[in-house]
Structures are given as C-alpha cells and as structure tokens.
Image (cartoon, grey):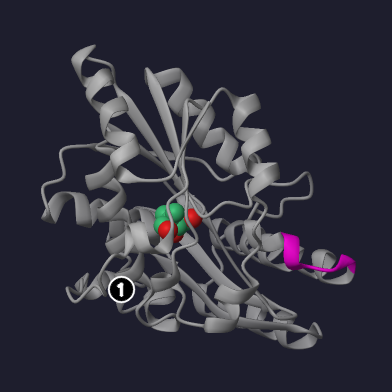
Amino acid sequence: MKLIRSIAEWNPHWLNHLQKSQKIGLVPTMGALHQGHLDLVGKSKVMMDVTVVSIFVNPTQFNNPEDFKKYPITLEADLEKLKESGTDYVFVPSVETMYPNQTRLTLDFGDLERVLEGKFRPGHFNGVGTVVSKLFHIIKPHIAFFGQKDLQQVAIINRLVQDLSFDLHLEVVPTRREMDGLAMSSRNLRLNDEERKKALLLFESMNQAKNRLLEGQAWREVKESVRINFEREKHTQLEYFELVNPDSFALYGEFNSEQKSSICIAAFVGEVRLIDNLPIIP
Ligand code: PAF
C-alpha cells in the first residue's frame, strides 16, 4: 500500500494505470475508519483493478467549528485497517494541497439542499461538493464509492456528477450497522457508554415508524409519537424526522405505498449529532 500526500506524487501512478487500461476505484473518507468504510473498500476491490482511499477531514463542510475540532482523527489505526483490506493507495493530502487558494466558486444544489442536512447545516453541501469535485479531478477514478448512510449526500453527488459531466460512475453501498442496529459512524467514537445506549433511539424510531406506516397508520401520527419519545429521553434532541423521496428529497406529508420513500433522521445524543435513514419503499 502506497501513501500519497500530493497531486504530483499521484500523477505518475495514475498514468501508469491508465496505460495498462486499469480501472481505478476511489473511496473518499474523512478517516476514523470503521467497517462501513471497509465495506466500500471491499466493493471497490471486487469491482476495480486499483483501489484508492482518500483521508481528508474537509474543513469547508463543517458549519460548526466545534464539530470540526472534535472530529476524531485516528490516522495510524486507519492506515493499519487499509493495509489489511488490500487498499492500493491512500491519498492523505494537506489542507494546502486541497485548498491552495480560498475557493470562491460556490455550488447551489437547489431544492436538494434546502431540506434536512442542507437546512440544518448551512454551507455543508457546498463544502462536500467542492471537495468531492477536487478529489474527482485529482484521482480521476472510474467509479467512486459512497455509503447509503449519507443518503442526501449521495443525491447531491449524483447531481454534481450529472450537472458537471464528471466522467465517472457512483456506486452506493448499504449502511453497515452494529449488532443492535446503530448505524456505524465515525462520530460514534465520541459517544460515552450511556449515550451509546441512547443512540439506539434513532434506529428504533425509524424501524417502528416503518412498521406502523406499513400497518396503515398516518405519517403525521407516527412522526408526532417519535417527537414525543425524543422529548421524554434526556440528553437527546431530535432535529428532523422526515419521510422523503430518496432521489429528489421532496418531503412527503403522507405515506403512499406506491411511491419510493425513505425515512431520514438527525438527532443530538449528548453533544454528538447523528444521522441515519431507512428505506420504506425502495
Ligand atoms: O462522507 C464523508 O466522509 C465526506 O462527506 C466526504 C464524502 C469524504 C467528503 O469530505
């Protein structure tokens, strides 16, 4: 496994693989790797000739400076896991490499970013779109791998690829969960034991809501009971719990079993903000 820190270091490797007509897979990450990330690597290993994992905690996508400061950094352990997974290259650029100048161009994803993550984290998707565009230009992958856990991010990057004509394909990998159902996330590392138990409320709420919707209960009632449950549970704060079209992120006011739909949730458990989603009608 080769550690690459600059664009100049990567370019000769890229050219070498291009000359051999080898297909390159990119797994963009912010490090603090868990099995969910390794699933993306595994998928790339199966589908591609060469797998590149990028590790870069992108400052421009954090709307909250405290969240950025506290984002877990575990580079040594990450490199160990990637070596074991058979990753070919790890791209670990500096902030200066990714942002030699302050980026002036801004991206507006329209309706897609006026709801959920876009609404509660202003500027977040501009930062994601900017850094992902840069990674696509630098690494030039044939396929980029993303987790379904960040469902709205997937829709945003899909739009980015279409609107800017990136010559690549996106591959979305299902959310990896802990045994009890909690979605794996780098942020879980910041939960203490008590918070870790409370964090299960996200998955339980979505699961119960799914069952109740499929039994015919009204979405309004289901949503209200989730809100009340969160209010009762100390040290948790529900930010949103919505039923959406997973492609357009249009919010539904009612459940319709004929329409593609997913539940999306964001909540604070202690000081840690967690998100998750569950397909209801895929
Ligand atoms: O999903 C993430 O970890 C980040 O948003 C990404 C795609 C690596 C961009 O920084």
| Placement of 159 over or under 92, stated as above or below | below
The magenta span reads 189-193
Pinpoint residue 65: horizontal percent, then vertical percent: 53, 82
Q: Residue furthest top?
A: 20
Res. 222 visible in picture: no
Task: Please report the residue visible at 20 percent of the width from the left and 74 percent of the height from the top.
Answer: 106
Q: Residue furthest right?
A: 193
Q: Which quadrant of the structure image shows residue 227?
A: bottom right
Pinpoint residue 96: horizontal percent, then vertical percent: 37, 63
Res. 280 visible in picture: yes
Q: Is residue 219 magenta?
A: no
Pinpoint residue 280: horizontal percent, then vertical percent: 49, 53
| Placement of 212 over or under 25, stated as above or below | below
Along the line of sight, the residue nearer the viewer: 53 or 189: 53
Q: Which residue lies under the disc numbered 1?
A: 113
- Within 10 Å of disc 1 (Cα), the crowding (few <14, some 14-19, many 20+) is many
Q: Is residue 192 magenta?
A: yes
Q: Which quadrant of the structure image shows residue 195?
A: bottom right
Along the line of sight, the residue nearer the viewer: 165 or 269: 165
Pinpoint residue 85: horizontal percent, then vertical percent: 60, 26
Callout 1 amino acid: Glu
Along the line of sight, the residue nearer the viewer: 154 or 86: 86
Q: Residue furthest front?
A: 8
Task: Please report the residue visible at 80 percent of the width from the left and 70 percent of the height from the top.
Answer: 198
| Circle 1 SS class | helix
Task: Please report the residue visible at 12 percent of the width from the left and 54 percent of the height from the top.
Answer: 164
Task: Please report the residue visible at 39 percent of the width from the left and 73 percent of the height from the top.
Answer: 124
